[in-house]
Amino acid sequence: MAIRVCVAGATGWVGRLLVKRILESTDFSLSGAIAQAAAGQDIGTAIGRTPAGLTVSASLEEALSQPTDVLVDYTRPDTVKQRVLTALSRGVRVVIGTSGLNAQDYTEIEQAARPSRLGVIAAGNFSITAALAKHFALFAARHLPSWEIIDYAHADKPDAPSGTTIELAEKLAAIRKNRSQFPIERTHGRRDARGANVAGTQIHSVRLPSYVISFETVFGLPDERLTIRHDAGTGAEPYVGGTLLAVRKVMTITGLVRGLDRLLFEGE
């Protein structure tokens, strides 16, 4: 039986390609599409295809009038949390592709999911190659004691640091304590020039035209340096495969899983 998926942000950069893949698939069926700017239109027409026989909704409540198994959210950091909590209260599992949530937000989401035995999978980046870059950085941290992260994105990305790098910093902290060569609090001049401290890692966010989404973890030792970097292109294709993998997996889990790497390397 096909998994019934509702997509929030259905006409956005990732959302429209995700909707296209779902409409073409026999493993998934599109039960709802949410996009305020396109509300009332046929979703096929809204993404530049032939009509699909499903009307775009303006709200989650409207979209969930149809039976739904999984909500996939690719929207905005200021609206995603409430939509996730509402979906869980309606018995719907969730895949979160929207970045900008913090540790407290995820604690609340997990507390909402577990009592109902529902699953939530969240990732700052659903690209499989980005998940590999994170995995390699976590492996390197077992052997290298000092690192910082540089986070690159387009000029109008609203959140900083990115969800990808926040997630990575928190996981690095679980591997070992980052050893700073010079305490940030002893910095002369502007301490904020040293970046934002997330779980013991300094993250430097660059927001400029020509970047899409990139990040690099820089490890340093005396007289040598290791950089593990991921660069995304201008298309949304890298994120769709990982998102659909998460849609399949979320049907089998209870509680919250953060990071696509957890799905790719489960059991390691």
Image (cartoon, rainbow, N blue to C red):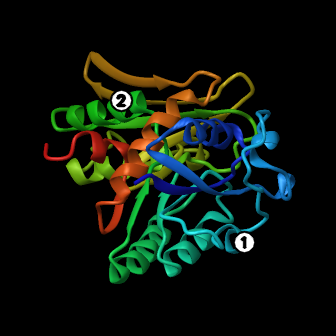
Q: Which residue is mark 1?
A: 62
- Quadrant of residue 55 within the rendered picture: bottom right
Q: Is residue 99 among the parts visible in the rendering? A: no
**CA gap, disc 2 to disc 1?**
39 Å
The image quadrant of residue 115 is bottom left
- Of 196 and 49, the residue lying toward us: 49
Residue 133: give its label: 2
Q: Amino acid at mark 2?
A: Ala
Measuring from the top left, give residue 68's x and y in whole percent: 53, 65
Residue 171 visible in the current orientation: yes
Along the horizontal axis of the image, is 26 left or right of 264? right
Q: Amino acid at mark 1?
A: Glu
* In the displayed structure image, the side of residue 175 where residue 85 appears, left or right: right
Where is residue 203 drawn, in percent x and y?
A: 49, 43
- Of the 4 image quadrants, the one containing the N terminus is bottom left
Q: Residue at x 56, y 47 (%)?
A: 161
Residue 267 placement, left or right of 112 = left
The residue under the point 74% across, 68% down is 59
Looking at the picture, does residue 197 appear above or below residue 45? below
